Image (spheres, rainbow, N blue to C red):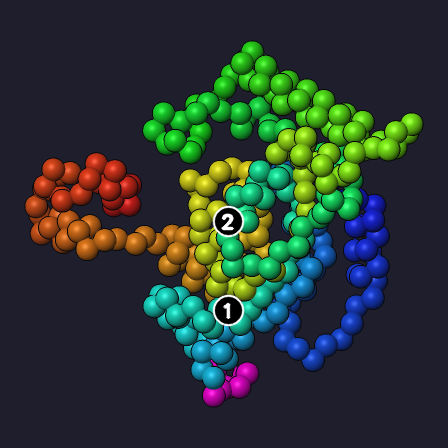
Amino acid sequence: MPLSPEHQAEIDELRARPQSTLRSTAAGMEGHLYTAYPVLDHGFVRVIDYMGDDAAICQAARVSYGRGTKSVSNDEGLIRYLMRHWHSTPFEMCEIKLHVKLPVFVARQWIRHRTANVNEYSARYSILDREFYIPAPEHVAAQSTVNNQGRGELLEGGEAARVLEILKADSARAYDNYEAMISQDGQQGLARELARMNLPANIYTQWYWKVDLHNLFHFLRLRADAHAQYEIRVYAEEICKLVADWVPFAYKAFEDYRMGGATLSATALDCIRRMVKGEEVTQETSGMSKGEWREFMQVVG
């Protein structure tokens, strides 16, 4: 189960005690508060708290205007202008705090985004649960032949079964030894901070992750992208759904200009202008490397 009985009891208690507030709230996000949304086999994402909404972004951009002084259509237009012209500060006025349960190897990718506040479950003080990420057969793939950090064709049949069995057996054996080392039954037991080093990177950890909307959009642009590793991408995709309900105008602008848009170099723009004029442009005449040309052709189709 993604949620422990303790977490579920906490959620039930919080939902049973709704409180009134004078601060701005987002109806879409209020419906998500505390709910744990499953990700992978044992993970989840849930919203602990948030601050701000679409109106807060506009208020910060206008500075001298208060809430309600502009029409909704003007608010949406302003947010799209801010996104289009890379004016990031107003988006920093919104923040979100998430509780995330995720495999350690995913956490190590995630923590590379150093613009958030993080507090992780401590295996020095507490004992980690016997929960490991084991990929579904459709996600067990060979090394890509064109991308050194990606996957290629799926492993099939006996080879896929062999790999999955190794993952399960190694995980179980490592945790058995972890328990044996920290056990105080007839022995002193090894310190937890030392015993944890024997655990594999697919064991689950948890953290609270607080980030402003500008930096969250940067995270989502990279991690919800089709080229991102599947195991972190599914977390990003779940967060996208939350953000879409929280700040719908900002998220739509983000989809249009960041997720669905493309950044082109001066050389690439020159090639497009030449193509529009009817010139046949090739990689050899483009001024681009083979890698740049391949990426350019993926953009222009």
Element type where label 2 sits in the image: loop
Left or right? Give the position of 189 relative to 94: right
Circle number at residue 92? 1
Dominant SS type (magenta):
loop
Stretch of the chain drawn in magenta: 64-72
Is-magenta flag for residue 218? no
Residues 16 and 190: in front is 190
Residue 101 sits in which quadrant?
Answer: top right
Residue 9 coordinates in the image, percent (x, y)? 84, 52
Amino acid marked by disc 2:
Arg
- 60 versus 14 height, above or below: below
Amino acid marked by disc 1:
Glu
Residue located farthest toward the right when viewing the structure as drawn: 186
Query: Can residue 55 be seen from the camera position used here?
Result: yes
Q: Earlier in the sequence, mark 1 or mark 2?
A: 1
Residue 135 sits in which quadrant?
Answer: top right
Q: In which quarter of the image is the N terminus?
A: top right
Which residue is at 47% across, 84% downward?
63
Residue 162 coordinates in the image, percent (x, y)? 59, 14
For discs 1 and 2, the disc positioned in front in the rendered view: 2
Element type where label 1 sits in the image: helix
